[in-house]
């Protein structure tokens, strides 16, 4: 195991915060690349996991808004 696997992945506390249609419910285990992940609940009812960087900078729904716009 190399040293990079031993470093904790910094992630700000996001539990309870809202990002667009998403509310962060809890911290999830890091992904295979060591990226911090969060469990989120979408206003449409779906739950999913999202990386911290995506949550803070771009993702605003579980994908439901994109599906609606494609269908329209």
Image: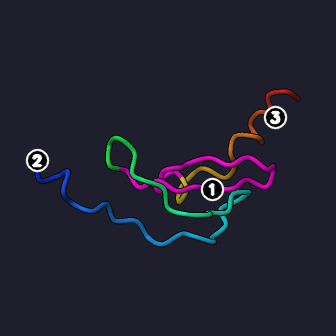
Left or right side of 47 for 36:
left
| Residue that badge 1 annotates | 40
| Residue that badge 3 annotates | 69
Q: Does 52 appear above or below 68?
A: below
Quadrant holding the C terminus: top right
Quadrant holding the N terminus: top left
Residue closest to the eye, 26 or 13: 26
Taking the spot 81% from the left edge, 34% from the top edge, the residue there is 69
Residue 3 coordinates in the image, percent (x, y):
11, 53
Q: Please report the bounds of the magenta region as a residue range.
A: 35-54
SS at mark 2?
loop
Residue 13 coordinates in the image, percent (x, y):
48, 72
Judge depth for marks 3 and 2 and give the one in front. Answer: 2
Q: Residues within 10 Å of mark 2 (few under 14, many from 20)?
A: few
Q: CA distance from mark 3 to mark 1?
A: 22 Å
Residue closest to the eye, 43 or 72: 43
* Residue contact between numbered discs 3 and 1, judged by CB atoms under 8 Å: no
Residue 59 coordinates in the image, percent (x, y):
61, 50
Residue 60 coordinates in the image, percent (x, y):
66, 52
Taking the spot 48% from the left edge, 51% from the top edge, the residue there is 51
Q: Does 39 appear above or below 63?
A: below
Precedes in sequence: disc 3 or disc 2: 2
Precedes in sequence: disc 2 or disc 1: 2
Q: Residues within 10 Å of mark 3 (few under 14, many from 20)?
A: few
SS at mark 1?
strand
| Residue that badge 2 annotates | 2
Q: CA distance from mark 3 to mark 2?
A: 45 Å
The colour scheme used here is rainbow
């Amino acid at each position: 195991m190399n040293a990079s696997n031993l470093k904790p992945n910094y992630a700000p506390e996001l539990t309870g915060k809202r990002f667009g249609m998403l509310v962060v419910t809890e911290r999830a285990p890091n992904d295979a690349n060591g990226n911090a992940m969060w469990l989120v609940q979408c206003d449409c009812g779906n739950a999913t996991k999202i990386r911290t960087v995506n949550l803070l900078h771009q993702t605003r729904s579980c994908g439901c808004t994109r599906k609606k716009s494609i269908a329209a």
